[in-house]
Amino acid sequence: MALAFRVIDTGLREGRSNIAFDEAMIELHRAGEIPDTIRFLRFEPSALVGRHQAIGRELNVEYCRDNGIGLVRRITGGGAIYLDPGQLGWELVISRARLPLPTLAAYATRICESAADGLARTFGIDARFRPRNDIEVDGRKISGTGGFFDGDTLFYQGTVLIDADPSRVMAALNVPRAKLEKHGLDRPESRIVTLKELLGQAPEVATVQRALIDGLALGLGLDAIAGESLEVEERRATELHDADIGRDAFVFEIDARDAREALSASVQSAGGTVHAALRIEGEGGARRIREALITGDFFVTPPRLVMDLEAKLRGVQIDEAGAAVMQFFAACQPDLISIAPSDFRDAVEAALTGSN
C-alpha cells in the first residue's frame, strides 16, 4: 500500500527564510503536527555552507557581498553550495517508522536513486546516484543532497540545477584544488551541469517537480497528494528566523569560534574533509586541549554530535586525544555516511603533531 505524502511548493524565498522553514518542518513533524511531506523551494541568490563549515574558508565572502548574494548556514551537513532561482530545491520529511531502512546511507541511496530515475525517465538523460550524496550525468553533478535523523524524523534535501551560470556558482565558492583534482577536472565550472545545457533549453520548473515526484513515488512507494503550507509552519518558521537562523550570530557562529593561533589540520577521506582546530593549555606532560573546533563538509546525524565531540575533547591530555575520539564514537554509535570515526581521530592527531 502506498504511503500518503503531502506535496507543497513554498516558492521563491530569501535563503535564511528557507532554512528557517526547514527547521520548522522538522520540529512540527517530530511533534506529530504535520504529515510526511515533499517540499519544493527556490532561493533568492544565496551561498550556503553546511552545518559544520566555516564561512570564511568555504565562501568568497567579498564576491557574495559585492554581488548581492546572501550568506546562509544550512541545518544539514555537507559542503558549500550556491543557489538562485534557476535551481530547484526538493526536500522530504519522513517518519522512519513508516519507511524503515537501516541507516542514513541506505536512505540516501534509496532516495537519490529514486530521484535520479525520475529525472532520467522524464528528460532522457543518464542521471545516476553517485555516493556519497550526488546525482550526476556523465560524471558531472546535477544534484547534491544531504540529510539527518532527528528521532523518528528523517529530513532529506537536494537541489536540481535547471539553469545556472556555472562561473557564478563557482565564483561564490572556495572550491579546493584537491577536490577538483579528485574528479580529474581542470576548471571548477566543469564539475557541474544544468538541465538547460543537457537539453538545449531550460525545462519548466513544474516539469522538473513532476519528474522528482514520479521518481520518488515509484522508488519509495509514495502516494503524492498536493497540499499547501500550514499557518503553523509559516508562523514557526518566522519565529525561528527572527530568533536564530536569520541572524548573523547563527550564520557566522563557527567563524567566531575559529581559533586564531590554534593548532590545526585537515584530513581528506572518501566521506569528506574533517578540519580540527585545537587550543592547547598547560605545560610539559600536563598539556591538554582547552578548546576544540571540528568543521568540514561531512554528514553526521544528529548534527549536534559534533558539538558533543568538541565538548568531550575539552580538558583531555594531548597524548590521549586520539583515543578519546574513538571512545566517544564507540559510546554514541552514530550513523555516518562514508565518513569514519578514524577520520576525526586522524584530524585531531594531525593538528596536535603540526601536520597539515
Image (tube, helix red, strand yellow):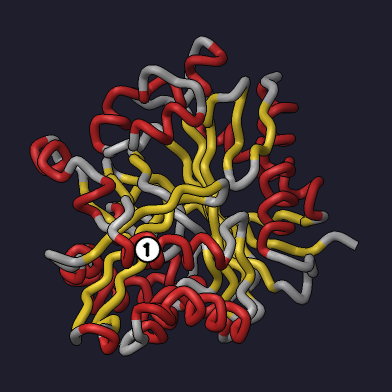
At x 48% / y 57%, what residue is drawn? 298
Can residue 145 be seen in this snapshot?
Answer: yes
**Residue 350 in the image: above or below residue 217:** below
Figure quadrant of residue 189: top left
- Relative image position of residue 230 (x, y in whole percent): 48, 71
- Residue 138 vs 333, above or below: the answer is above
Residue 74 visible in the picture: no
| Amino acid type indicated by mark 1 | His
- Where does label 1 land, which residue? 52
Observer-nearest of 228 and 332: 332
Instruction: Name the image quarter holding residue 32.
Output: bottom right
The residue at the far right in this view is 1
Please name whichever residue, 224 or 95, is drawn nearer the observer in this view of the structure: 95
How far from the left and from the top, in percent, is residue 234?
Answer: 39, 70
Identify the residue at horizontal 28%, vertical 52% (top origin): 14
- Image coordinates of residue 295 in percent, x first then y, are 35, 62
Q: Is residue 100 left or right of residue 272?
A: right
The residue lying toward the viewer, choosing from 33 and 151, is: 151
Residue sitting at 32 percent across and 31 percent down? 169
Q: In the structure shown, which secondary structural element does the residue marked by tag 1 occupy?
A: loop
Total marks shown come to: 1
Residue 308 location in percent, x, y? 43, 82
In the picture, measured across the screen, residue 124 lies left or right of residue 164, that is right
Q: Which residue is the extreme one toward the front?
A: 284
Q: Is residue 199 above or below residue 205?
A: above
Give the crowd class for mark 1: few <14, some 14-19, many >=20 residues within 10 Å.
many
Q: Quadrant of the N terminus?
A: bottom right
